[in-house]
Image (spheres, rainbow, N blue to C red):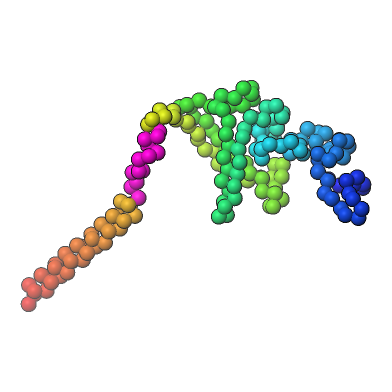
Amino acid sequence: MYVDYYPFTQGNLSVAASPQDYTDLNYLPALAAGNLLASANRTSPIEDLVAGGFGTITSQPVDQQNVAGSGSWADGRWKVVFARDLISPEAEDVGLRVGQVFPLAFAVWDGSNRERDGQKSTSQWISLQLEQAPPLQEAAARAAAPAASREPYIFVIGPMAGVLALIVLGAAGLYVVGSLTARRK
C-alpha cells in the first residue's frame, strides 16, 4: 500500500503500516472491495474458491470459508494439506461421497514467476475416489503392524535372480562350446 502520509511514524523513523492500523478504508481499497487476502484477521493461508469453468473463479464470502489447511516448504518441495467436511453446508461446494469418482485438478500461482490471475500452472485432470474408512480397531492394528512391502523382492531378489540366470546361462554356454570343441578333436 502506498500513501503520501504515514500517520503511524515516529520522528524520522519509518514504521511499516499494517491494515489493522487503519480505520479509514480509503487507505485500504482491496479490503474495501472485499478482497479476503487484504484482511488483517486471516486465520488461514487457505482461501476457499469456487469455479464453474474458465474465467469464473470466485472467492467464497468470509462466512463460507470452510476449508482449513497449511503448507510447508522442505527439500525444494511444497507439501500442502487441505481439510473440509465431506458434505459442506455451502450450496456451491461439492458434496464428496464414498465410492463416487470426482474429477479433480489443481491450479498454482507462482508469484516469483510473475503468475497472477489467469497466468498459472495447472495440473491434468485426475480422478478422486474416497474409500470407507476402516473401523477404528482395524485402523489401529494396521498402523501398529509392520507394513508388508514388496520392495525387497523387486530391488534385491529381482536383480539377484537376474545375475544367477546369467551365470547359469553362461555356464551352460561354456559347457556347450566345450562339448562341441571336444567332439571336433
- Residue at the spot x=25%, y=57% of the render? 161
Q: Judge from the rendering whether residue 125 lies leftward or rightward of residue 145; answer left or right.
A: right
Q: Nearer the viewer, residue 49 or 168?
A: 49
Q: Nearer the viewer, residue 183 or 51?
A: 51
Q: Is residue 122 visible?
A: no
In the image, residue 150 sits, relative to residue 140, either above or below, namely below
Q: Quadrant of the N terminus?
A: top right
Q: Judge from the rendering whether residue 7 lies leftward or rightward of residue 130; answer left or right.
A: right
- Residue at the spot x=72%, y=28% of the render? 61
Q: Quadrant of the C terminus?
A: bottom left
Provide residue 95's location: percent of width, then percent of height: 56, 25
Q: Quadrant of residue 135?
A: top left
In the image, residue 88 sits, relative to residue 35, either above or below, namely above
Provide residue 81's location: percent of width, then percent of height: 57, 40
Whether residue 27 is in magenta: the answer is: no
In the image, residue 35 sits, relative to residue 168, either above or below, namely above
Provide residue 155's location: percent of width, then percent of height: 34, 55
- Residue at the spot x=66%, y=45% of the render? 109
Residue range of the region highlighted in magenta in the rendering:
139-151
Q: Is residue 141 visible?
A: yes
Provide residue 107's location: percent of width, then percent of height: 62, 41
Give the farthest residue toward the front: 10
- Residue at the spot x=66%, y=40% of the render? 45
Whether residue 141 is in magenta: the answer is: yes
Q: How many marks?
A: 0
Give the farthest residue toward the bottom: 185
